Every structure is written in C-alpha cells, then in structure tokens.
Image: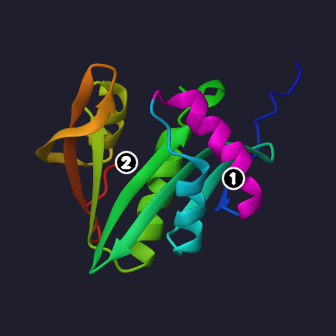
Amino acid sequence: MAAVVQPAVQVRAMRMADLAAVSALENASYEFPWSPGIFTDCLKAGHPCWVLCVDAAVAGYGILSMGAGEAHVLNICIGPAHRGKGLGRHLLRRLLDIARWNGAERVYLEVRMSNPLAKALYESVGFREIGRRPRYYPARDGREDAIVMALEIAAGNLQK
C-alpha cells in the first residue's frame, strides 16, 4: 500500500511579497473584496497579518487588530481550492493564539448574515453573537447587516 502524503501546512507572518497571492485569494472569495491597498495598509500599520501556506503556497490569510486588551479579526479567508479541509479552523485557532500572546482577553469579529458556514465555524470555537451592525457590508441590493460576535479568550475558555 502506498503511503498517503499529507500536505505541509504552515502559518507564518505575512510579507509584502505575499500581497499578490493574498489579493488573488480575496478576489476569488468575495464579491466585494478588500483592495490590495488595504492589505498594504494593514502590514504598514503593524497589524498582526498572517498567511496559511499549503506546500509553501499561500492558501489563506488572517488579519487582526489589537488594542486595550482586545483583538478584532479584520479578515480571515481560505482560498476556494482549500476549503472544507479544516484549514479555516486551523488558521482561526492560530489567530486566537496570537491575540492571547499579545495580551487580548476578548476577540471580536463581524460576519455577514448571508455566511452561515463562517458563523458556524466561529460558534464552534466559542464565539457568540452579541449584536448586529445594520447595513455594515456592501451587497448587490444595497447593504447587508453584520452579526457581531465575541469570544472571551481567558485561559480555558476556548473550545476544541
């Protein structure tokens, strides 16, 4: 029997050289994508920006903002070719570790109401809905509400 070779998965700090691949994933994933300039600004501002690589190729990314004992997941994405393999959960857990290592006690994020798979992922690691932001996201028919979610990341609060 032939051995099954698992792909090498690595999460590392995003570099300027990653921006073309990150922008390509963003454009392939969202109808209203971030511009390359937004990613550049996040790197220049010193936000924790990370990429998930599969066999050394960028397959996903996540960006946090940090301050006052809190973190905010600004963007997290796994490219279409790599979805459904647990990589989103892997990257989200790493972002939560990074938030904790940087002194955050609570993490916030917004998710589109039209994205139940992402909401389910966030709930599966312990995020809970705490509110709504009306008309937060651009949408084909105008604007779409965001679900605001939060997670306490004090020791022992994270779910498997």
At mark 1, the secondary structure is helix
Q: Return the x and y of residue 121 as percentages of the image width and height.
A: 36, 37
Q: Return the x and y of residue 9 as percentages of the image width and height.
A: 70, 47
Specify the quadrant that holds the N terminus: top right
At mark 2, the secondary structure is loop
Q: Residues within 10 Å of mark 2 (few under 14, many from 20)?
A: few
Give yes or no for residue 21 being in the magenta stretch: yes
Task: Establish if 85 lies above or below 67.
Answer: above
Point out the frontmost of discs 2 and 1.
Answer: 1
Q: Please tell me which residue is depicted at 36% across the width and 34% down the height of the picture.
A: 118
Residue 53 relative to residue 66: left or right = right
Which segment did they paint magenta? 16-31
Q: Nearer the viewer, residue 127 or 160?
A: 127
Q: Which residue is mark 1?
A: 19
| Amino acid at dot 1 | Leu
Q: Main secondary structure of the magenta part?
A: helix
Q: Which residue is mark 2?
A: 160
Q: Nearer the viewer, residue 105 or 17?
A: 17
| Scheme of colours in the image | rainbow
